[in-house]
Amino acid sequence: MSKPGIIVHGGCGRIDESTIEERQAGVKQAAEAGWAILSQGGSAIDAVEAAVVVLEDLPLFNAGRGSVLNREGRVETDAAIMNGATLAAGAIAGVTGILNPIRLARRVMDASPHVMLIGDGAELFARSQGFVRCDPRELIVERRQEEWEREHGTVGAVACDQAGRLAAATSTGGIANKLPGRVGDSPLIGCGTYADARVAVSCTGDGERIIRMTLARLAAFLHEQGGSAQQATDQALGQLEAQLGGEAGLILIDASGNAAFAKSSHRMPVCAISETGVILQC
Ligand code: ASP
């Protein structure tokens, strides 16, 4: 019997320590939004989308409004969502004028024959689907330049619903000062985001390294090989550290509702909610 649950992350890496409480409140608010859906018998895919939308709307996190700037001082967002029950997935990358990139990724999954759309093509599709394009400057939040360079805050959520269906979602502005056109791990299925019938995974951290480890799929594979949720999560991160180094973190949930997370960075705000209660860490 599956136990429903959701776990949400707010990105790994260095953060301004004075923002910890606010970040914890943010991941908790997001997990509660997902849990409200799961506890009423809603689907894991709706729960992860709702959780990520909450964090995209909070300017403190590097997703949607509040995303980091690229070298030209512009925001380019990446996002992906995957339904473990059907292996359907949708992703967008390099999108500049959409307030909630995860909603667009969901629409790519539900209403297009493709898995991923980028840049102008993604924005054209958004318009055809009735999304309102925002002024790209609306995504930019006033912060000092050194904060952009220091801070992370990619967001992600994984959930298991009452029927044991799993889903994963990740949304980010990427890394600060990236070259225009750079795409990280978050929207790449199997790298920063993955879900199947057994596990759902969302990653954060050094995208250039996470991509080369296909970290989310590695964690799923280690779980398939018999590891528990926590063992698969720890071992995947261990392999990344041993082979490529860098800072990363990931959250995982399995079809029994066991949630796990691991990080190699000092901080990663996380909130997990299930019938047994709330776990909040940073
Ligand atoms: N993984 C994201 C990227 O490389 C960044 C992050 O998680 O902070 O785009």
Image: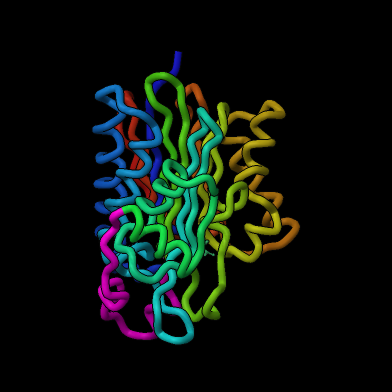
Kindly tell me whether residue 261 is visible in this rendering. no
Residue 134 colored in magenta in the image: yes
Between residue 151 and residue 53, name the one nearer to us: 53
Q: Quadrant of residue 58?
A: bottom left
**Residue 99 seen in the figure:** yes
Q: Residue at x 53, y 51 (%)?
A: 203
Q: Position of residue 215 (x, y in %)?
A: 64, 50
Instruction: Tell me: residue 140, above or below residue 104.
Output: below
Colour theme: rainbow
Q: Which residues are magenta?
A: 130-152
Is residue 143 shown in magenta? yes
Q: Residue lying farthest front?
A: 128
Residue found 52% across the figure and 30% down from its top: 86
Image: 9 above or below 185 = above
Residue toward you, 175 or 81: 81
Q: Give the left or right position of residue 7, taking residue 59 as reference.
A: right
Q: Residue at x 26, y 59 (%)?
A: 57
281, above or below 36, in the image = below
> Which quadrant holds residue 45?
top left
Which residue is depicted at the point 34% across and 53% down? 129
**Quick one: which residue is furthest to the top in this view?**
1
